[in-house]
Image: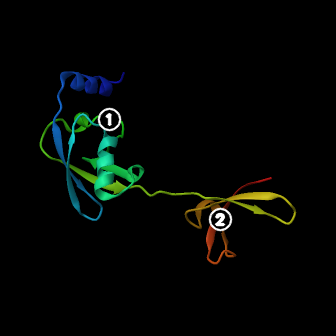
Amino acid sequence: MTHTGEASERHKSEGIDTTIEIKVKTMNSQTHNLRISNQGRVWNLKEHVSLLIGTRMEQQRLIYYGKALEDDVYLSLYFGSGGPVHLRLLLKPLLEFRMLFLGSRSGSRVLYHICPTPSAHGANLRRDVGRPVPMCRFWSW
């Protein structure tokens, strides 16, 4: 068990359960207040933020004194039981790569994935779909 785990187990066994007041400031300078038990983990806090603000948990990055909070760490280890906690919410971009099979006249198949930018992976632009779509050749057989 790591040092972090030992400390969190000690807090749980001692029954030290207090409510923390947390102020979350978003990228557009809105501040949201919430209260949560210090015995929860960071991912519990992200669930609350998700419900409050409407951002997906996997997109959230919570910053406390310049450091990103790790999802599986108990809040009591970060914040203790002091006064209000001020967090900064940053959003991580969600890049979704879609796969596309294209056949050729010779019968071979080529697998492409749609790239986030035209310059990524030396992508070629396909214009036959009505608008430029960045395409990266993934493999062929």
Say which quadrant the N terminus sits in.
top left
Residue 64 or 38: which is nearer the viewer? 38
Residue 123, image x, y percentages: 64, 64
Q: Check the image and report above or below for 58 versus 15.
A: below
Residue 35 or 110: which is nearer the viewer? 35
- Give the spatial CA distance, label 1 vs label 2: 40 Å
| Residue count near mark 1 (Cα–Cα under 10 Å), binned few <14, some 14–19, many ≥20 | some
Residue 133, image x, y percentages: 62, 70
Question: Mark 2 and mark 1 in contact (Cβ < 8 Å)?
Answer: no
Residue 35, image x, y percentages: 19, 46
Read off the residue under disc 2: 135
| Residue count near mark 2 (Cα–Cα under 10 Å), binned few <14, some 14–19, many ≥20 | many
Q: Residue 53 carries which label?
A: none
Is residue 129 left or right of 96 when viewed as pictured?
A: right
The image quadrant that residue 125 belongs to is: bottom right
Q: Check the image and report above or below for 90 versus 1.
A: below
The amino acid type, in three-letter code, at marker 2 is: Met
Is residue 134 left or right of 18 when viewed as pictured?
A: right
Element at label 1:
loop
Is residue 138 left or right of 93 when viewed as pictured?
A: right
Read off the residue under disc 1: 73
